[in-house]
């Protein structure tokens, strides 16, 4: 319903889905927050539904700085592990490939980008500063999947 309310012309509509890392979180030293099988099943259900509404492209998740964690949020200690984020990205990419949905893997490129890592360090180790978001935006802008939906 959220997407449909914003589509004026289905033939000129597209959905950009950014894969999140929240399901990979370890809460209060336990985890992960969502079992991997459940996380992938929910992802597959979402992309199946969304791809039926309009063209769909999916962007992978970026790495975090493990040494900055855990972080307190709403009474929980959140921690993330790059290994789990990378594995989730691999599983999401496979689900998209099975369905012919363009997927932009971002994890490795961002992990190897000193400027992106500095942008993470500047905030909280999980969310980048504006410079980091610009690096991500540049990745997307250079991607054929993006150019395919924006024409």
Image (cartoon, helix red, strand yellow):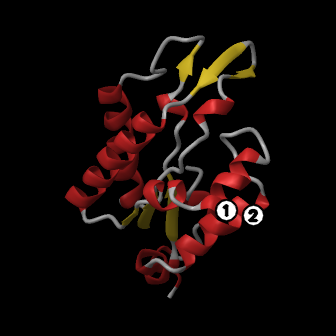
Relative to 67, residue 143 above or below: below
Q: Position of residue 109 (x, y in %)?
A: 48, 62
Q: Residues within 10 Å of mark 2 (few under 14, many from 20)?
A: some
Mark 2 element type: helix
Q: Residues within 10 Å of mark 1 (few under 14, many from 20)?
A: some
Q: CA distance from mark 2 to mark 1?
A: 8 Å
Q: Position of residue 108 (x, y in %)?
A: 44, 56
Residue at 49 percent of width and 30 percent of height:
23
In the rendered image, the residue lying farthest to the bottom is 151
Question: In the drawing, what numbered circle is on residue 131?
Answer: 2
Nearer-the-camera pick, 37 or 90: 90
Q: Nearer the viewer, mark 2 or mark 1?
A: 1
Nearer-the-camera pick, 69 or 142: 69
Judge left or right: residue 128 versus residue 58: right
Sequence-wise, the earlier of marks 2 and 1 is 1
Residue at 33 percent of width and 51 percent of height:
48
Q: Position of residue 142 (x, y in %)?
A: 51, 80
Where does label 1 land, which residue?
115
């Amino acid at each position: 319903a959220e997407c449909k309310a914003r589509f004026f012309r289905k033939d000129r509509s597209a959905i950009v889905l950014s894969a999140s890392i929240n399901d990979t979180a370890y809460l209060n030293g336990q985890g992960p927050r969502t079992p991997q099988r459940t996380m992938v099943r929910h992802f597959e259900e979402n992309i199946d539904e969304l791809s039926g509404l309009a063209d769909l492209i999916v962007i992978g998740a970026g790495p975090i700085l493990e040494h900055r964690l855990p972080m307190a949020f709403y009474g929980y200690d959140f921690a993330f592990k790059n290994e789990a984020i990378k594995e989730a990205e691999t599983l999401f990419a496979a689900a998209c490939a099975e369905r012919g949905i363009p997927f932009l893997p971002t994890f490795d490129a961002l992990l190897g980008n000193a400027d992106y890592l500095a942008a993470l360090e500047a905030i909280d180790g999980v969310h980048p500063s504006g410079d980091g978001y610009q690096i991500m935006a540049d990745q997307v802008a250079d991607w054929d999947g993006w150019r395919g939906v924006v024409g």
